[in-house]
């Protein structure tokens, strides 16, 4: 998730490998790199961990020569510099969680020209030469919003909490939610705020507007732990909501899930949680590896999202705090689901 | 004559403008949400309280004049939030509070050394300090687990007493203390003197260097405690947490009527300025302005207020000319008539 | 010509001049008749007549507060008189139309006491600012002005030894004054030159040269008005003398008919006698009075013994300006305890330069007075208005300052009353010593008399009063006078020995040898090295990078490394031009982002509208500039607000990153020169443009405004117009940056621009530009931008986590600044 860094770090450019330039970066034992634009929230932490786990395993099994992980500060400049660094280091493949859909295209094109396989994931880049491993933001958000509309019976007041201002995922998700809302004319949007996909920002934004609003029946969010923040805001406000919380869309954070579980046992509260999975880090690793090995998947591949409903809630109740719901994706999973033509079902 | 009296009142009590703005916005808000109540303000009050605490520190720094400004508050807030939660999880609240205070004092001291000792312009000095704090936050972020908020702090930050947010009470207490400091202590006088004319202040026996240094420390300490409370309020810390506070604290100070050139500050004005800013944002969200337009409005408001108030907020001396004197510009010329 | 006694009314003063002019048949260059100017209770000028004919050298003489500078302000069009008429070359001019610009055009020039040179520019460039008509924006345009400068200096001060390409800031004060004078005399079409205390910083030899120059030029028809309090000098140089006192002209006649003592009588009158009486009627100092100041060592070498100043005394520090009195005064204030100056006990300071060193303009009178007690109190000690009022009453009464005025804003008071408030401030404190630095400047006679009586009382009541004055006559009321010359005390006069003659004699005592002017020096080697630091840093970084990975030096590698720098360099140039005006632009990054968005959306879909929007954007930047200067709003807040406006517009145009780059734009930024990496070519191009702009006459004017806007406006340069030009230039560079972003990324993202803002400030500072004072360096900025760009690369090469990038950047910034400070190029001027 991208952030507008006012204390942007220097437009550093590529540095040279901390580790010695990987020798024999050949197709036999490739060097796979991760260029992650932003490391500032728990989703990203988990994603990078997933990548590292998969890479460690591959290295132990002798499949790759080495792997590199570079985390940026959210700025386009730094990611440009880091990717350029990887090009100069002559790695074989780069998995990119992009700082911007467009602003890193230039350096990605240069990488492709240098013969490096590039796959962008989660926050994808629109450079024509790279592969895209995306979530179906529009699709799952639409599904989730429709579930909420049904729960409301087609009428009520909702707050829409958006994500990272100006980012592609935010735009896609918001457009999807808007189209669902249009189909439900008796549902009124009483406030639209930006939660920046972060608990604290979401909490603050919702708390700001809550006192001026009529009774809120549901909250549409975008995930990334904004769900926990939204719940906190209502919890702190108290009032009418103490007994009956509005239907808050879950974004997969374990804090929210646990709160949900407590609410359920207290008064039968129910909602639905769908989230993009940080496990994509591991999937991206294996995909990059397969690309170096000569696979030719479709240019755009879609990852599934994790869904938590009333039915499987108890499976997730005991997750540690501060974790996002996510399965781990293995090499086999990637071969079977991504390298084929059709997009996968859950 | 009443006309002259009124404009004199406005000139001497510049905070009246921002209060007016607050009332106007409150009216708009009430009309837009069809509920005219004190309740409308309470949510805004919480955000404004956090802003006020920081804006007061910024106000003090700006009052020292010579273009002094504190851009490092963002870094202080963020780092304090991280540290307060991390340390509290390990060692409990008192130690956490001490560490937070230490951050504030250290950051302020560094700023002071750079600005007072080395004569580096405050913009650059605090910018550089901010960079270093950003790095510290990044390092702290790596080991950040996400829990460990002290329940006491959470109660202060997020609790309510009889419907009134505790943080608002805290903010008001801070405002009162700062007002007292400015108006009734030797430091307050020394501060205003330094901002108006540092050379004259030095020649009048004021230890200008110490005053400026103390002010930077005060600003950082306020920001540090704000960071700790903010972290407790949102139940966590995240990078760039403090960033929005830079423009907002500047805006609050300026809209509240403190002179950007230094020498005159009004704590009450800063309160209303903060309230005004937060209300502008909230109103826009509720009215449903598209986000781009919201940004434009925020920027335009600050510029417009400055442009309109420009003349009277910069002019030094009496607002209304006293007959049969020449217009106020003559005062400056008179001062310059040395022969 | 009889000497008019003070009781004669001023109407007689006009007659001789008219007769003179008619007799000689010369037309008056300037005739001021009946000039009256009133400030509240003070009549600064009271029906003053002044006639200056071609070839006249008129000496304008008078004590402090006599009205000389007001009259000159009227003459130069800076101030409008309340009454009276002005005629130039025999033609009457409407006083309401007369302004500085017109005066300038008619050939009236003034050399002020506060220098109006821009010290970030060279001597030749300062000459250009004075007479810009001959400048053309072509290479070598400075040659004309170098010649002019050299010629002018030679004419006035033969053998001056000043390098005309030296920055004025590097010249010692005496040479600066020489340049200032020469500049004015060389102005084409100059008819009348007003010299205000021109020899205050000149050595003996230079003063002589100036005098002979004046004589020569006067003979050729140029008119001069010579203002000085060095009466000896006046009598020697001028052909006619005009004496002002209390705003009125009390004497006007040929200089050969008057002597110094007669002038003194005309100027000072009763005050002289009163001063002597005051001293004589004072009770003697107690024999066992405590000595609180000891001056010895190097300062009293010529005197031969130490000097001890005791409580109860009034001691004067006399001598020519710049002989060391002020320096000693400040050392005493600083509480120095050395072999040369030893001060026991605390000192309070009362300055005559009320605006710069005394008054707090936002406060009322009481607060100004009460500050005297704040300095030594504990910071959290409470202050209450009641206590302050009580404490201030006694001193106010002593000074005959009406307590009813305690609540008035201090600026409402007359000069004399303001000074009284400042003295009251010193009196409310508990210091043993009060230091006065020329306190009767601009104070009317009535208030002056009050001072003199007070000083003695204050001293005898138990304090030591040390009094520095630029009017020798004031020393008559001191118990002792220490006369300074050449930085030392050369004479001590006690009691009735104190006369103006004795003081003057002693002042010139140590000056037998002609004092050589201090070498014009120039920046030292250390400073030069520091100036080159950005380039050195860049080379070092490049070397480190290449050492670790030779691939970095290949064209491909360089292009890769430097391509992000293109946009940064352009934004940094935009920032540089704003910083050159001593302002900061916090919205430049957002503006670049907006342009980038326009480029990727409108410019592609509807090019015509796109271009219009680009133009509108640059125009908007110009409006920002106009707003800042015309409404005098601080740039930092306006541009910060503007950044939100730019970002908001950009966001409205394009909520999500996307768009595409027009083909012609991509081609513009993607051309291929064989052998040269594209990014280097683009950066070099940008650098060349910025460098050229800066070196053009336009660039000099912009930098001049950044250094001394008051002088520029006085010299007739329109400040708002040039502010708009400055911001339009910045806007154009930012525009190029935005278009570069679009071309290189083939798309746009409104969020991508913001971070550039603060980095551009860092680049500018690292590159050697000062944030105040108008020192900028295009090459340095390129180096700064490239250093920042490569910094991350090098850190990565050294295996440092990217988390630390920010800290390193901050430290680098500070290191650069600290280096400059320690090498003597301080940013702030106090």
Image (tube, coloured by chain):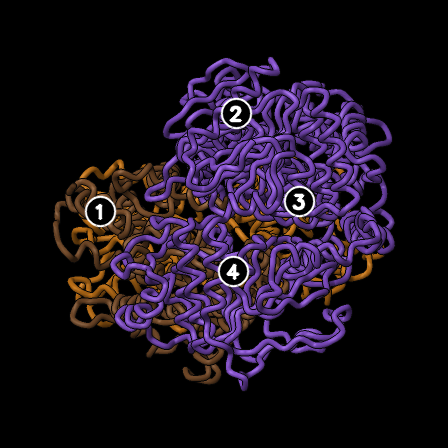
- Residue A300, x across and y down, in percent: 56, 40
Distance from disc 4 to disc 1, alpha carbons, whole Å, reads 31 Å
The picture places residue C546, in percent across and down from the top left corner, at 85, 51
Task: Tell which circle, 4 or 1, labels the residue nearer the N-terminal end.
Answer: 1
Which of discs 4 and 1 lies nearer the camera? The answer is: 1
- Neighbour tally class for label 2: few under 14, some 14-19, many 20 plus, Cα within 10 Å: few
Which one is closest to the eye, mark 2 or mark 4? 2
The residue under label 4 is B72
Question: In what element is the residue under mark 3?
Answer: helix
Q: Which residue is mark 1?
A: B20
Q: Which of label 1 and label 3 is nearer to you?
A: 3
Residue A275 screen position, x and y as percent: 42, 55
Rendered residue at 77%/26% (across/down): C148
As drawn, the chain in brown is: B
Q: Residue at x 87, y 49 (%)?
A: C550
Q: Is label 2 in contact with label 4 (beta carbons under 8 Å)?
A: no
The mark lying in front, picked from 3 and 4, is 3
Are callouts 1 and 3 both on one chain?
no
Q: Earlier in the sequence, mark 3 or mark 2?
A: 2
Q: Residue C161 lies in what quarter of the image?
A: top right
For the residue labelled by badge 1, is the local secondary structure a helix, a strand or a loop?
helix
In the displayed structure image, the side of residue B264 where residue B201 appears, left or right: right
């Amino acid at each position: 998730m991208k952030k507008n860094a006012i204390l942007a770090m220097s437009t550093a450019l590529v540095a040279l490998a901390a580790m010695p330039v990987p020798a024999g970066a050949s197709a036999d034992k490739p060097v796979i790199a991760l260029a992650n634009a932003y490391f500032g929230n728990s989703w990203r932490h988990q994603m990078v961990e997933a990548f590292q786990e998969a890479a460690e395993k591959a290295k132990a099994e002798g499949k790759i020569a080495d792997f590199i992980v570079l985390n940026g500060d959210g700025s386009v400049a730094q990611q440009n510099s880091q990717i350029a660094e990887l090009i100069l280091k002559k790695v074989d493949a780069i998995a990119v969680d992009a700082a911007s859909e467009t602003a890193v295209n230039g350096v990605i094109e240069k990488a492709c020209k240098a013969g490096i396989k590039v796959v962008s994931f989660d926050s994808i880049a629109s450079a024509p030469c790279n592969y895209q491993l995306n979530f179906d933001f529009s699709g799952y958000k639409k599904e989730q919003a429709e579930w909420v509309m049904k729960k409301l019976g087609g009428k009520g007041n909702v707050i829409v909490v958006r994500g990272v201002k100006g980012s592609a995922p935010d735009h896609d998700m918001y457009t999807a939610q808007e189209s669902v809302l249009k189909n439900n004319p008796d549902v009124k949007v009483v406030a639209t705020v930006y939660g920046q996909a972060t608990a604290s920002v979401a909490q603050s934004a919702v708390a700001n507007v809550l006192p001026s609003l009529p009774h809120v029946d549901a909250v549409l969010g975008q995930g990334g732990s904004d769900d926990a923040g939204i719940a906190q805001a209502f919890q702190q406000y108290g009032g009418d909501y103490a007994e009956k919380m509005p239907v808050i869309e879950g974004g997969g954070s374990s804090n929210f899930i646990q709160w949900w579980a407590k609410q359920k046992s207290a008064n039968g509260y129910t909602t639905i949680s769908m989230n993009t999975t940080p496990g994509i880090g591991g999937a991206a690793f294996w995909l990059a590896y397969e690309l170096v090995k000569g696979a030719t998947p479709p240019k755009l591949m879609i990852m599934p999202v994790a869904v938590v409903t009333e039915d499987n809630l108890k499976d997730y109740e005991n997750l540690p705090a501060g974790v996002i719901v996510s399965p781990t994706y293995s090499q086999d999973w990637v071969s079977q689901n991504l390298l084929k033509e059709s997009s996968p079902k859950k | 004559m009443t006309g002259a009296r009124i404009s004199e009142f406005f000139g001497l009590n510049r905070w009246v403008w921002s209060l007016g703005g607050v009332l106007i916005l409150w009216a708009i808000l009430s009309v837009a949400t069809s509920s005219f109540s004190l309740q409308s303000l309470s949510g805004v009050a919480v955000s404004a309280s956090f802003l006020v605490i920081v804006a007061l520190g910024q106000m003090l720094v700006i009052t020292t004049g010579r273009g002094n400004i504190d851009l490092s508050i963002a870094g202080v807030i963020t780092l304090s939030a991280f540290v307060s939660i991390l340390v509290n999880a390990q060692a409990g609240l008192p130690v956490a509070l001490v560490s937070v205070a230490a951050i504030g004092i250290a950051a302020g001291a560094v700023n002071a050394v750079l600005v007072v000792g080395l004569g580096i312009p405050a913009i650059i000095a605090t910018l550089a300090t901010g960079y270093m704090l950003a790095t510290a936050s990044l390092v702290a972020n790596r080991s950040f687990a996400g829990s460990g908020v002290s329940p006491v702090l959470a109660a202060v930050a997020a609790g309510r007493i009889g419907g009134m947010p505790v943080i608002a009470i805290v903010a008001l207490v801070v405002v009162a203390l700062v007002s007292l400091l400015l108006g009734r202590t030797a430091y307050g006088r020394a501060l205003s003197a330094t901002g108006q004319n540092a050379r004259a202040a030095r020649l009048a026996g004021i230890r200008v260097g110490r005053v400026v240094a103390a002010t930077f420390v005060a600003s950082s300490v306020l920001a540090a405690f704000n960071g700790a409370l903010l972290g407790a309020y949102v139940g966590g810390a995240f990078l760039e947490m403090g960033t929005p506070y830079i423009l907002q604290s500047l805006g609050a100070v300026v809209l509240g009527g403190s002179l950007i050139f230094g020498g005159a500050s009004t704590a009450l004005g800063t309160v209303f300025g903060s309230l005004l800013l937060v209300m502008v944002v909230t109103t826009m969200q509720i009215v449903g302005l598209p986000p781009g337009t919201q940004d434009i409005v925020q920027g335009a408001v600050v510029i417009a207020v400055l442009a309109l108030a420009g003349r009277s907020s910069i002019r030094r001396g009496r607002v209304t000319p006293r007959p049969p004197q020449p217009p106020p510009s003559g005062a400056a010329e008179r001062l310059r008539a040395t022969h | 010509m009889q000497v008019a006694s003070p009781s004669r009314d001023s109407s007689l003063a006009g007659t001789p001049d008219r007769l003179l002019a008619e007799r000689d048949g010369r037309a008056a260059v300037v005739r001021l008749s009946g000039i009256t100017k009133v400030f509240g209770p003070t009549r600064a000028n009271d029906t003053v007549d002044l006639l200056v004919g071609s070839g006249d050298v008129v000496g304008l003489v008078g004590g402090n507060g006599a009205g000389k500078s007001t009259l000159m302000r009227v003459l130069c069009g800076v101030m409008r008189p309340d009454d009276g008429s002005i005629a130039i070359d025999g033609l009457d001019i409407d006083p309401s139309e007369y302004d500085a610009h017109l005066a300038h055009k008619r050939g009236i020039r003034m050399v002020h006491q506060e220098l109006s040179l821009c010290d970030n520019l060279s001597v030749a460039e300062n000459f250009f600012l004075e007479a810009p008509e001959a400048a053309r924006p072509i290479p070598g345009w400075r040659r004309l002005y170098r010649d002019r400068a050299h010629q002018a200096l030679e004419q006035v001060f033969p053998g001056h030894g000043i390098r005309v390409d030296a920055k004025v800031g590097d010249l010692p004060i005496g040479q600066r004054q020489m340049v200032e004078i020469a500049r004015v005399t060389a102005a084409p079409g100059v008819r009348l030159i007003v010299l205000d205390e021109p020899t205050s910083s000149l050595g003996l030899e230079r003063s002589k040269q100036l005098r002979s120059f004046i004589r020569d030029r006067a003979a050729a028809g140029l008119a001069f008005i010579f203002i000085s309090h060095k009466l000896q000098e006046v009598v020697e140089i001028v052909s006619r003398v005009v004496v002002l006192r209390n705003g009125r002209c009390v004497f006007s006649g040929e200089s050969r008919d008057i002597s110094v003592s007669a002038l003194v009588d005309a100027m000072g009158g009763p005050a002289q006698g009163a001063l002597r009486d005051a001293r004589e009627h004072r009770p003697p100092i107690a024999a066992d009075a405590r000595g609180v100041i000891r001056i010895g060592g190097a300062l009293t070498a010529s005197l031969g013994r130490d000097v001890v100043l005791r409580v109860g005394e009034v001691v004067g520090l006399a001598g020519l300006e710049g002989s060391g009195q002020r320096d000693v005064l400040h050392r005493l204030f600083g509480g120095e305890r050395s072999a040369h100056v030893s001060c026991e006990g605390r000192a309070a300071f009362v300055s005559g330069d009320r605006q710069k060193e005394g008054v707090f303009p936002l406060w009322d009178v009481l607060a100004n007075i009460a500050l005297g007690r704040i300095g030594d109190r504990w910071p959290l000690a409470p202050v209450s208005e009641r206590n302050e009022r009580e404490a201030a009453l006694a001193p106010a009464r002593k000074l005959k300052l009406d307590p009813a005025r305690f609540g008035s804003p201090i600026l409402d008071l007359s000069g004399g009353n303001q000074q009284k408030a400042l003295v009251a401030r010193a009196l409310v404190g508990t210091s043993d010593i009060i230091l006065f630095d020329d306190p009767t400047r601009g104070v009317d006679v009535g208030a002056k008399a009050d001072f003199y009586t007070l000083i003695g009382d204050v001293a005898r009541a138990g304090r030591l009063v040390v009094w520095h004055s630029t009017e020798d006559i004031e020393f008559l009321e001191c118990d002792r006078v220490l006369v300074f010359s050449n930085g030392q005390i050369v004479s001590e006069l006690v009691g009735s020995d104190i006369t103006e003659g004795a003081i003057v004699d002693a002042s010139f005592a140590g000056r037998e040898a002609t004092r050589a002017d201090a070498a014009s020096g120039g920046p030292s080697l250390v400073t030069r090295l520091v100036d080159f630091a950005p380039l050195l840093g860049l080379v070092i970084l490049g070397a480190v990078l290449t050492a670790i990975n030779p691939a970095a030096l290949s064209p491909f590698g360089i292009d890769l490394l430097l391509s992000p720098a293109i946009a940064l360099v352009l934004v940094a140039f935009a920032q540089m031009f704003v910083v050159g005006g001593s302002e900061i632009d916090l919205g430049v990054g957002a503006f670049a982002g907006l342009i980038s968005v326009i480029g990727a959306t409108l410019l592609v879909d509807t090019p015509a509208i796109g271009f219009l929007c680009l133009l509108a954007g640059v125009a908007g930047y110009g409006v920002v500039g106009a707003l800042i200067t015309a409404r005098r709003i601080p740039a930092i807040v306006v541009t910060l607000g503007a950044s939100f406006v730019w970002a908001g517009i950009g966001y409205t145009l394009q909520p999500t990153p996307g768009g595409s780059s027009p083909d012609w734009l991509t081609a513009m930024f993607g051309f291929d020169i064989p052998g040269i990496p594209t990014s280097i070519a683009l950066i070099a191009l940008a650098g060349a443009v910025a460098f050229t702009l800066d070196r053009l006459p336009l660039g000099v004017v912009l930098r001049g405004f950044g250094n001394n806007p008051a002088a520029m406006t006085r010299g007739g340069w329109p400040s708002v117009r040039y502010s708009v030009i400055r911001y339009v230039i910045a806007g154009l560079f930012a525009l190029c940056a935005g278009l570069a972003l679009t071309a290189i990324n083939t798309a746009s993202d409104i969020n991508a621009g913001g971070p550039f803002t603060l980095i551009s400030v860092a680049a500018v500072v690292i590159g050697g530009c000062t944030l105040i004072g108008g020192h900028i360096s295009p090459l340095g900025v390129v180096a700064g931008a490239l250093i920042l760009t490569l910094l991350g690369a090098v850190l990565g090469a050294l295996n440092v986590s990217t988390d630390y990038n920010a800290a390193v950047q901050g430290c680098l910034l500070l290191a650069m600044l600290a280096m400059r400070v320690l090498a003597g190029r301080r940013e702030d001027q106090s």
